[in-house]
Image (cartoon, rainbow, N blue to C red):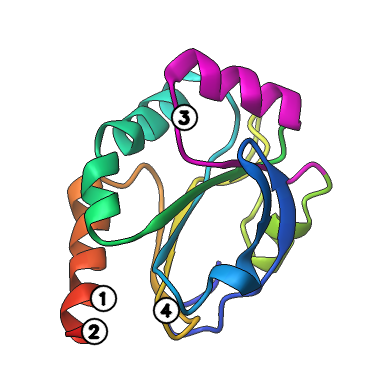
Amino acid sequence: MLSVGALAPAFRADSTKGTIDLAEVMGRQPIVLIFYPMDDTPGCTKQLCAVRDAEPSYAGYGALVLGVNPGTLESHQKFAAKHNYDFPLIADVDGRIRHLYEVGKTLGFLTQQRIVYIIGLDGRIVYAEKGLRPTEEILSALEEISSKKD
């Protein structure tokens, strides 16, 4: 897992909202990267529905939220349509992004650990936590970024 203060690796990948080029976005807005194990499992659905429900709060901080897992683009599109996710889900089929962000694999049927990163305006990791993080905790970290900007 990357540490707070580390430079966030840039990547270019396909998503449910078109191609995402992180290098083009970094420095312009905070980025919330949510690495989640699988589409349409109870924990992952709960996690991403919480993001969907808090979308106005994320937008208030100008944050770009990206879900990332090794599922296919087709799987992500079905998952996003089923739950009305308006934020991009990135297809990391070859695991390249997971490796860049040092997201480990899990035991059992899940494919990768659950980690949330926030990338600040300077392109560095300002938040890095494993597990199913509460929305309030993520928004609080975005608030810190926002208050430093003012």
Q: Quadrant of residue 60?
A: bottom left
Numbered range of the magenta stretch? 72-93
User: Could you say where residue 137 lies in the image, as x and y percent from the top left?
Assistant: 21, 55
| Distance from the alpha carbon under mark 2 to that under mark 3 | 32 Å
Image location of residue 111, percent across then percent down: 68, 37
Label 3 and label 1: CA atoms lie apart by 26 Å
Residue 28 lies left or right of residue 146; in this view the side is right
User: Quick one: SS at disc 2?
Assistant: helix
Q: Which residue is mark 3?
A: 44
Q: Which residue is mark 1?
A: 145
Q: Is residue 121 toward the left or the right of residue 149 in the image?
A: right
- Element under label 1? helix
135 to 122, vertically: above or below: above
The amino acid sitting under disc 2 is Lys
Measure the alpha-carbon separation of dots 1 and 2: 6 Å
Residue 40 appears in the rendering: no
Vertical arrangement, residue 58 with respect to residue 126, above or below: above
Q: Are marks 1 and 2 in contact (CB under 8 Å)?
A: yes
At a point 55% along the width and 42% down the height, the residue shown is 88
Q: Does the magenta segment cover residue 86?
A: yes
For the residue marked with disc 4, what is the amino acid? Val
Residue at screen point 54% across, 69% down: 25
Mark 3 is surrounded, within 10 Å at the Cα level, by few (under 14), some (14 to 19) or many (20 or more) other residues, namely some
Query: Along the polypeptide, which appears first: circle 4 or circle 1?
Result: 4
The residue lying toward the viewer, choosing from 118 and 134, is 118
From the image, tell me which residue sits under label 2: 149
Q: Marks 4/3: CA distance? A: 24 Å
Does 64 appear above or below 113?
Answer: below
**Residue bearing the label numbered 4:** 4
Q: Residue 75's spot in the image, x, y percent? A: 69, 23
